[in-house]
Amino acid sequence: MIRVIRFLQLGFVMDLLYSAFSFLYQSGDAFAFLVLSACGLAVIFGMMGVINLAHGEFILCGAYVSTSATQMGLPLPLSIAVGAGVAGLIGMPLERLIIRHLYSRPLDTIVATWGISMIVTQGTLIVLGSTMQGSGTPLGSFMVGNYSYSVYRIVLMGTALATLAALWLVFTRTRFGVLARATIQVPHIAQALGVNTGLIYSLTFGLGAALAGLAGGLYAPTMTLVPTMGSAFIVEAFVTVVIGGADIFLGTAPTAAILGVIKAALTSWHGQLAGQIGMLLSVIIVIRILPRGISGWILNERP
Amino acid sequence: MSALSHLVSIVTLLEGPQTLGRGRRFWSGVILILVAAFAYPLFADGYDVGNNVYFFNWIFMALGLCLIWGYGGSLSFGQTAFFGIAGYAYGVLTINLGDAYGLTLFALIAAGLISAVCAAILGYFLFFGRISGVFLGIVTLSVTLVMERFISQTAGPEWHIGTARLNGFNGMGGMPSLTVPWPGGPIVLLPDVGLYYVTLVLLVFVYLGLRVLVNSRFGNVIVAIRENPERAEMLGYDVRKYQLGTFVIGSSLAGLSGVLYTSWGNYITPASMGMTAASLPIVWVAVGGRSDLTTTLLGTFLVLLVFQALTIYGSQYALVAMGTLLVVTVLLAPNGIVAGVVSLVSKRRVRKRAKSEQVL
């Protein structure tokens, strides 16, 4: 009798552990998606106060380039790096040609980048057709309890954390990072001290574009490649940046963690769309309470 | 007597500091265009007339965006959300209520009110949270994209309101057109001459009404807020209330567009709230010249004409052309191409006049 009860208890505890793992996995997955899709947008916004509406198209670029690279026989990590690199290399001249002229008019930057986004989406449709052969999710899966989980998703979570760490190192430990932060804080003083702020803007925009390309390359194996795939990312990226505010480490990362939990909870409750709607609603409510975003709130609270 | 003086004071607001165009010359031009517009169905065939109604339908949304963006200074990317809400509301209401007893006209008003209420709720959170320009744009864009995705997945039979199936990605059809009850039998406003005149009259009223609005005290305050919110606040205006009011009016106009469009084609799809659809109003208003109602109206009409012409020759390239037009406008003529031409012409005229005065 006692043995039966203990067995039942054990079963109950195991079930609890399994569902805890499942929830953690889903939250982590949502966190990774939010961080990876938002950090490029946040880098550009934090630096220049510009929201890059062509963000989704840099993601698209990363996804298409990395998939083509994989199909040409490059190993996956390398082809993802190629995708990110190409997106970054496209971003820099774009900043030179178009965005540079609009820094004094932030609203017009959104409009111009939206124009670019229309051109690229439609151009991709014309040149490459309505869909592209994907490469399939690599690395197989593992079982916990009755459910199987994709190993690649765990890799994505690790990559999200690694990306944050790398960005932190870049912005605190490298010469570029120091100059970039100086330019963010007081652009004209930085310029007076001999910083080539134009170059810094170009590089930062390139970095943001490369991060978007990275997100595209990383998620390309998990989704269907269509010219409008960028719009699958941008709502998440937007809401993360809106709540997070201008700072990646104090804003984007904690926001992604909180929103990840909300999204995972709602998704497991009522499906993917409920997760997205719930996230948007929570964002609209949060901006009523914390207008300057989480990073503004954290910075205000600190002495 | 006092009613008369009231009317006179409203009529004088038709021109003022916030609108281009004044004096006998401008208004005789307007009347000439109106006469041409009213005479147009006499010379054109039914298809072209219906097609012009299609153009008119969109102009309401463009004028609303012009009010919010050009005059109010807050850029909303989500006007299509209200377009879609009102369109779907009209469809649901008319499919359930039918088209007798002028119920479609009731549905028109109710759908407009529903979109206004939605705009008021969203706007409350945005403006009372003091969301600044850039964020306002991307939150409203997110709203319309999520709406699109929500409606797209309502294909199953469980998604219905009354007898109206939402029909998901394929869109909702089969709703009756606007119908006016009339003693000699109801008049159904099919996309033909009747609907043309109704829409045209509505458009003229909205255009003149907005001219009065932006030249009134309210309009002057929202322009003051656009120029410098802090200063307006220091002068004692509650910036948030004025911005919310502008947003609700502009979004109701988007809703009106949605109803007219749905009634025009007896059809609405979630794609009308998607990324491409959301970008088009921005193109019309930016290209026309967002800071003035008249240039927006002309610009919207011209861009729609060009867009349709391009679509006939190669629908794929039309959107690329629109994107290019948008980028070029923002870079080279930030105040809009039509507005740029207008100011160029008036500058030249001033210069000519100055020259002739010198000669004298």
Image (cartoon, helix red, strand yellow):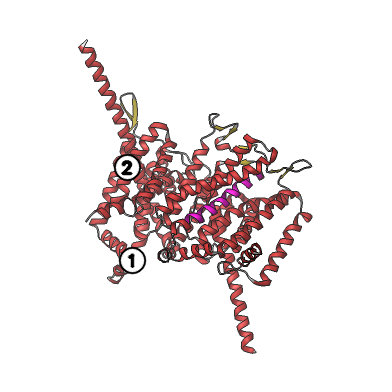
Q: Say which quarter of the image contains residue B216.
A: bottom right
* Mark 2, other Cα within 10 Å: few <14 / some 14–19 / many ≥20: some
Q: Which mark is residue A38?
A: none
- x 62%, y 81%: residue: B352
Quadrant assignment for the N terminus of chain B: bottom right
- Mark 2 — residue? A258
Foreground residue among B295 and A134: B295
Residue B252, magenta (yes or no):
yes
The reply to whether residue A55 is in sight is no
The reply to whether residue B152 is in sight is yes
Residue A31 in the image: above or below residue B232: above
- Mark 1 — residue? A197
Foreground residue among B347 and A151: B347
Quadrant assignment for the C terminus of chain B: bottom right
**Chain assignment, label 1:** A
Highlighted range, magenta: B243-263
Residue B272 in the image: above or below residue A300: above
Q: Position of residue B51 (x, y in %)?
A: 69, 50
Amino acid at circle 2: Ile
* Mark 1, other Cα within 10 Å: few <14 / some 14–19 / many ≥20: some
Foreground residue among B164 and A206: B164
Side of A287 where B151 appears, left or right: right
Name the chief secondary structure element in magenta.
helix
Amino acid at circle 1: Thr
Callout 2 secondary element: helix
Q: Nearer the viewer, mark 1 or mark 2?
A: 2
Q: Are marks 1 and 2 in contact (CB under 8 Å)?
A: no
Q: CA distance from mark 1 to mark 2?
A: 34 Å
